[in-house]
Amino acid sequence: MNVSLWPMVGLGFGVALGLGGAIGGVGGFVAVLIFGVLGFLAGRVAEGELDLGALFQKRSTQ
């Protein structure tokens, strides 16, 4: 079983940035949510589980 901590480290980092930058209220909740998701995705990219090149690759039409 391949258990990796990088996505969770990224999630924690994103949440910490969101909490540091947020004042509070609904806007703060949304900011923490967005930073958490971005941190989680950054962790997946760092681990190599998410390929950004494939996401932005131009599709061929046949």
Image (cartoon, rainbow, N blue to C red):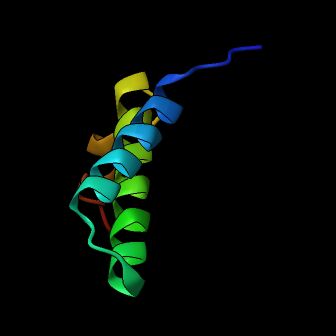
**Quarter assignment of residue 62:** bottom left
Q: Farthest residue toward the right?
A: 1
Report the number of numbered marks: 0
State the image coordinates of residue 24 (x, y, percent, origin top left). Answer: 35, 76
Q: Position of residue 57 (x, y in %)?
A: 25, 52
Residue 34, compared with residue 41, is above or below; it is below
Drawn side of residue 20 relative to residue 45, left or right: left
- x and y percentages locating residue 50 in the rendered image: 43, 38
Q: Quadrant of the N terminus?
A: top right
Q: Is residue 62 visible?
A: no
Whether residue 41 is situated above or below residue 30 in the rendered picture:
above
Residue 33 is left or right of residue 5, and the answer is left
Q: Is residue 9 above or below residue 50?
A: above
Picture coordinates of residue 14, whole percent (x, y): 35, 47
Identified at 44% across, 35% down, the residue is 44
Residue 57, visible in the rendered structure: yes
User: Looking at this view, is 30 or 52 the one in front?
Assistant: 30
* In the foreground, 47 or 14: 14
Q: Residue at x 31, y 57 (%)?
A: 18
18 relative to 1 in the view: left or right: left
Q: Residue furthest bottom?
A: 26
